[in-house]
Every structure is written in C-alpha cells, then in structure tokens.
Amino acid sequence: MFCEKAIELIRELHRMSDGQLPAFNVRCLKDHGEFEIDDGTVILLKKNSQHFLPRWKCEQLIRQGVLEHVMS
C-alpha cells in the first residue's frame, strides 16, 4: 500500500507544470488549531477537514500524525 501511494505521489508531482509549488490534498486527523501559510492565510486544522496545502508546509504535520496525504 505504501508503494502504491508513493508511486501515485510521484506521478502527481510529474504532472505539475513548471513553476508550480508541489502541493498536497491533506486530511486533518485531529484538531490542531490555526495554521498560517506564507501568504498570511490562516487555516483551521480541525479533525476530518480537508485542505490543499504546499507540501513543504505540511510535511512535518504529516510526520507528527496531524495530517495525512489524501490521494485524488
């Protein structure tokens, strides 16, 4: 299952056009509170909410178990 997700993620990154920042669809696994992204937008990370976030902004939260990557 992990390999399938990794392969799909690689495919998703290859489909992106040049100049775009890699971003993920993510689902919040637990309430985490407010989360600010670089443009100043504040997002409420609430359990079961879904967001489209820049990869580098959510990688640590994925490792911490706050977010999970959702495959389209």
Image: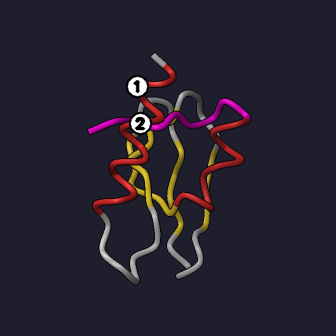
Q: Which residues are magenta?
A: 64-72
| Image quadrant occupied by the N terminus | top left
Residue to which mark 1 is pinned? 4
| Image quadrant occupied by the C terminus | top left
Q: Residue at x 61, y 67 (%)?
A: 36
Question: Percent position (x, y) of residue 33?
Answer: 63, 47
Q: In terms of secondary structure, where does tag 2 sit?
A: helix
Color style of the picture: secondary structure
Given residues 8 and 22, the one toward you in this image is: 8
Q: Residue at x 42, y 47 (%)?
A: 10
Q: Are marks 2 and 1 in contact (CB under 8 Å)?
A: yes
Separation (CA) of disc 2 from disc 1: 5 Å
Q: Residue 48, which numbered label?
A: none
17 with respect to 64 (left or right): left
Residue 32 occupies quadrant: top right
> Would residue 66 be counted in the magenta stretch?
yes
Residue to which mark 2 is pinned? 7
Secondary structure character of the magenta stretch overall:
loop
Question: Percent position (x, y) of residue 2?
Answer: 51, 22
48 with respect to 38 (left or right): left
Q: In terms of secondary structure, where does tag 1 sit?
A: helix
Question: Percent position (x, y) of residue 18?
Answer: 36, 80
Q: Residue at x 52, y 33 (%)?
A: 68
26 above or below 15? above
Residue type highlighted by circle 1: Glu
The local crowd at label 2, few if under 14, some if 14 to 19, many if 20 or more residues have their Cα within 10 Å, is few
